[in-house]
Image: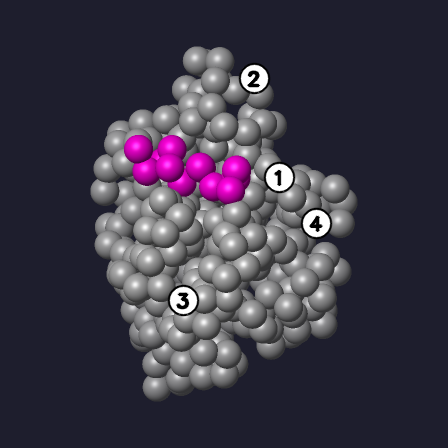
Amino acid sequence: MRNIPEIPVDSTGKTIPVIGFGTAEYPFGASFETLRDSLLHAIKLGYRHFDSAALYQSEQPLGEAIEDALSLGLIKSRDELFITSKLWCSDAHHDCVLPAVQKTLKNLKLEYIDLYLVHWPVSVKPGEYELPVKKKDLLPIDIESVWKAMEECQKLGLAKSIGVSNFSCKKLETLLATAKIPPAVNQVEMNPLWQQKKLREFCENKGIRITAYSPLGAKGTLWGTNWVMECEVLKQIAEATGKTTAQICIRWVYEQGVSVLVKSFNEDRMKENLDIFDWKLSPEDLEKISQIPQRKGFPGLEFVSEEGPYKSLSELWDGEI
């Protein structure tokens, strides 16, 4: 079992493991038992941060895996784990937030989660958990009132920390203008082909921790591409160093000082994804990676509509892609 380093998640001294295990498999909720068994195996290997979401339908299998890990003695207490979940767009309304986190806790069979995130800066009509969303259901998000309800979740101890996901610098500025509790984390797509330099600099200045999702491009999901794993520069570095392309990507993200989410249910790759701590990328390799042309894998066109609050990708990302 590997010990995974931790880094501060906010100014209070709370920490987050630098590598977490993602639970989004597409289509969502396809294989409850397989997912539960994979999550239990991940705990055996040493993974301690698990990233879930209401949308993924992975909260219940994760809750069962945690229960099994405790009864098998793989962990002594729930406190050894860092559990993240996310508020879906259909619950991104002030009065829906508290019931949503309570439902998440019930699914997970937990009294608290370590981190609760606003999944997207988007609201849709309450009701369904689905992606793609129905464009006719898109609504403007009232981020001030949604964030107030998120702050309430933290004050009640239901979430130890709160944050956001897929927020641009400008949307973070809007949130920070009225927030009493600043977001601890902004979870965003980040990999060598989408390096997020501007956003990382902004978040560092504001004391917001970045967590990277899709470090390998999330091939095989609705939002994924094979661009990262097929990148010639990364393949050449992997070959020259005797590592896999996946390890090069994960190590690169780790060296940027952010936490990263990996996801594979293949037992060899689950182990391989943790084997990134006892070696480094050379300055030459880092320089080559810094020159890779940038392209975002998941632009979020699903949230753009002529009739909706975001009429273009530029409005959704505030010109940052």
The quarter of the displayed image where residue 35 is located? top left
- Rendered location of residue 122, percent (x, y): 46, 68
Q: Is residue 238 left or right of residue 180?
A: left
Q: Earlier in the sequence, mark 2 or mark 4?
A: 4
Q: Is residue 117 visible?
A: no
Chain part drawn in magenta: 268-279
SS at circle 2: loop
**Residue 189 position within the rendered picture, expressed as x and y whole percent measured from the top left:** 45, 61
**Disc 2 or 3, which lies upstream in sequence?**
2
Identify the disc placed on residue 6: 1
Q: Which residue is mark 2?
A: 76
- Which is more toward the observer, 244 or 54? 244
What whole-number distance in Å separates the C-alpha atoms at marks 2 and 4? Answer: 25 Å
- Vertical arrangement, residue 213 with respect to residue 168, above or below: above
Residue under pointer 3: 193
Q: How is the image coloured?
A: one colour
Query: Residue 78 at what x, y percent from top left?
Result: 56, 25
Residue depicted at 24% across the width and 54% down the height? 220
Query: Mark 1 or 2 closer to N-term?
Result: 1
**Could you tell me which secondary element the residue under label 1 belongs to?**
strand
Q: How many residues crowd mark 3 within 10 Å: few (<14), some (14–19), many (20+)?
A: many
From mark 4 to mark 3, how far is it between C-alphas? 27 Å
Asked which quadrant contains residue 169, the reply is bottom right
Q: Tell me the kind of residue under disc 4.
A: Asp
